[in-house]
Image: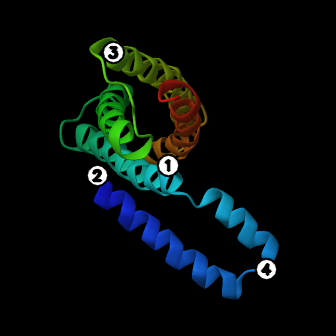
Amino acid sequence: MEKIKNFTQNTINIILKISQKILPKKLLVLEQKFLTVEVVLYIIFGVLTTIVNIGSFAILTSFFSLEENFANVIAIILAVLFAYFTNKGLVFNSTASTFKEKLYEFFKFMLGRAFTMIIELVGFYLLFNIINIPKLISKTFITILVIILNFFISKFFAFKK
């Protein structure tokens, strides 16, 4: 776990060194503010979570011919479980040590994800069933919105120190 964080920090340092030579000062300040190990790892694991989400959705609808909305629920659940375990240790450095603390943290994480799951379900339904946007485009668009919401919920609610 520590090796991943060190590698990420070293990569960020290289990017910042290069940026100092090519970016205007205002953009450099902005980059330094947002280019943190936490954000980079969240993006990486967010992409992997999205792959789990969209990939399982595609497999469930294409190979198993599940109805789109039901497949969407299963895909979201798989992605949430993947996200919890990666975010807990690798992104937000959970300090929960007792069983009670871990259970409470898991509950808060799931509560936040339940909230964004509702947003994802309603959003997908509206985009796919009402507006008639193709299913994978609908799924991808709403997933990006949910990833952004989940970062803030995880950082300031579920894994708040």
- Residue 19 point in image, percent of width and height: 64, 80
- Residue 115 point in image, percent of width and height: 52, 20
Real-space CA distance between mark 3 and mark 1, rounded to the nearest whole angstrom? 35 Å
- Residue 16 in the image: above or below residue 98: below
First in sequence: mark 3 vs mark 4: 4
First in sequence: mark 1 vs mark 2: 2
The crowd level at tag 2 (other Cα within 10 Å; few <14, some 14-19, many 20+) is few
User: Is there CB contact under 8 Å for labels 3 and 4?
Assistant: no
Q: For the residues carrying marks 1 and 2, which lies nearer the camera in this image?
A: 2
Real-space CA distance between mark 3 and mark 4, rounded to the nearest whole angstrom? 46 Å
- Residue 149 point in image, percent of width and height: 58, 36
- Residue 161 point in image, percent of width and height: 51, 29
* Residue 137 circle label: 1
Q: Amino acid at mark 4?
A: Pro
Secondary element at image label 2: loop
Q: Amino acid at mark 2?
A: Met
Residue 35, picture quadrant: bottom right
Real-space CA distance between mark 4 and mark 1, rounded to the nearest whole angstrom? 35 Å
Q: Amino acid at mark 3?
A: Leu
First in sequence: mark 4 vs mark 1: 4
Residue underneath mark 3: 103
